[in-house]
Image: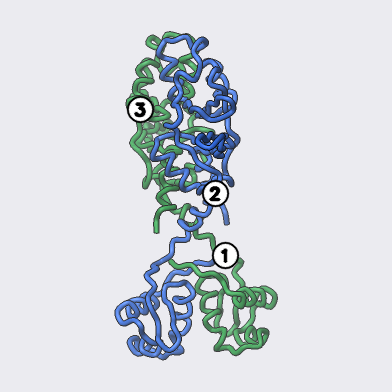
Chain colours: A green, B blue
Amino acid sequence: MINIQLSERQEKIIDIVKNDQPITGETIAKHLKLTRATIRPDLAILTMSGILDARPKVGYFYTGKTALSFVSESIRKIKVSEIKSVPVAIDEETSIYDAIVTLFLEDVSTIFVTSNGYLTGVVSRKDFLKNAIGGMDLNKIPVGVIMTRMPNIVTITPDESVLNAAIKLIDHEVDSIPVVEEIKVDEEKKEYKIIGRLSKTNITRLFVELGESN
Amino acid sequence: MINIQLSERQEKIIDIVKNDQPITGETIAKHLKLTRATIRPDLAILTMSGILDARPKVGYFYTGKTALSFVSESIRKIKVSEIKSVPVAIDEETSIYDAIVTLFLEDVSTIFVTSNGYLTGVVSRKDFLKNAIGGMDLNKIPVGVIMTRMPNIVTITPDESVLNAAIKLIDHEVDSIPVVEEIKVDEEKKEYKIIGRLSKTNITRLFVELGESN
């Protein structure tokens, strides 16, 4: 993939095609008071980039694609599975105190909570802080009491785009979301197995990688 | 700016130039068993993109630029001033409890601490949580006691790139950094005025904008 700054003449050609499409190369050249041979490289560039479309014996069309945004195209292609981290999960019966210890040991912003191995809740650093200053006995109360419980949890699957994950992080104002796999338990019931986490840290790290890549 | 996927023939031309530079268009065409006219658009694209350089009466050179990364180029151009948020700052004498209340009211992950209006420290949600479970009297101890103190604080200026800010966030393992302006107090002493904050949330929001732009 290469990048080209369009020349003034190429911009003019785009305008001519926009106004008079379909239009032959010969006619475009006449508009510009140039020969067909002179503008051949320009037309080649404009069709190769997808800005113009050429149909034999008809002429050139404007495709409606302006300057393609390669940035957004590249970003959209990256999948959650490519950048996800290992999840940190504890059982619902774990005490809040032990959950906080796990949070510090694993150095994560969010802990996922399970029952029988399936996702049932999420607790963030913010939730812990709120309860820690509340004066309750953190050793006696299980984390299941203070967690955000399913189905009020936003999740993502490994095949979804990182862009989608980032949108969820922003829209739901959370720092991290569980990457899950849907398991059909029986005809009516489905559960989620936690297979990763995707956080604002992952997005920031990816941003650095994209910015440093050459 | 447009993007073009190189054709097989263009890739071949690059290889030929790499091996035999400087080389005339005529000679390149001969290598490919094509006419000079046929490869004219290819050479135009390769020189316009900066991959090849053409010198009159000498021939084509390979510049060493491979496929330019437009993504990284675009990312590097964005400045901290373009996406920074309003900072949340409190005085060193504020109690830890009041600081935590501010953290929740402003819904930020990190609070900046000042003395005489200048940056002296930073406290994160993590610092607060650590102290909240420690059993100390949060109402009596000022935030200055538990904060990370200058000069152990990573800062950024509004003119620096967002990429640089992201690198600092990752390298120093923090969620948010103060955007500062350097003030010369006297010949020897300089202080920092806090004029913004840049967090992983800002980076994630920017990532979404880049991914959604078209």
Helix, strand or loop at mark 3: strand
A31 left or right, relative to B182: right
How far apart marks 1 and 2 lie (CA) works out to 22 Å
Vertical comparison of B60 with A84: above or below: below
Do the residues marked 1 and 2 share a common chain? no
Q: CA distance from mark 3 to mark 1?
A: 45 Å
Q: How many marks?
A: 3
Q: Chain of mark 1?
A: A
- Please name which of the two marks, 1 or 2, marks the residue nearer to the observer: 2
Q: Are marks 1 and 2 in contact (CB under 8 Å)?
A: no
Quadrant showing the N terminus of chain A: bottom left
Q: Residues within 10 Å of mark 1 (few under 14, many from 20)?
A: some
Tell me the residue at 55%/35% (across/down).
B186
Labels 3, 1: front one: 1
- Kind of residue sitting beneath label 3: Ala
Q: Which residue is depicted at the point 37% across and 11% down?
A: A139
The residue where tag 3 is placed is A89
Task: Please name the residue that numbered disc 1 is placed on.
Answer: A67
* Percent position of residue A159, x then y: 41, 46
Q: Chain of mark 3?
A: A
Q: Nearer the viewer, residue B174 or A94?
A: B174
Q: Is residue B212 above or below residue A202?
A: below
- The 10 Å Cα crowd at callout 2, few under 14, some 14 to 19, many 20 or more, is some
Residue identifier under label 2? B79
Query: Which residue is nearer to you in this view: B195 or A97?
Result: B195
Residue plotted at (44% across, 20% down): B146
**Sequence-first disc among 3 and 1:** 1
Instruction: Find the distance from the CA under tag 2 to the CA under tag 3.
Output: 37 Å
Q: Which residue type carries mark 2?
A: Lys
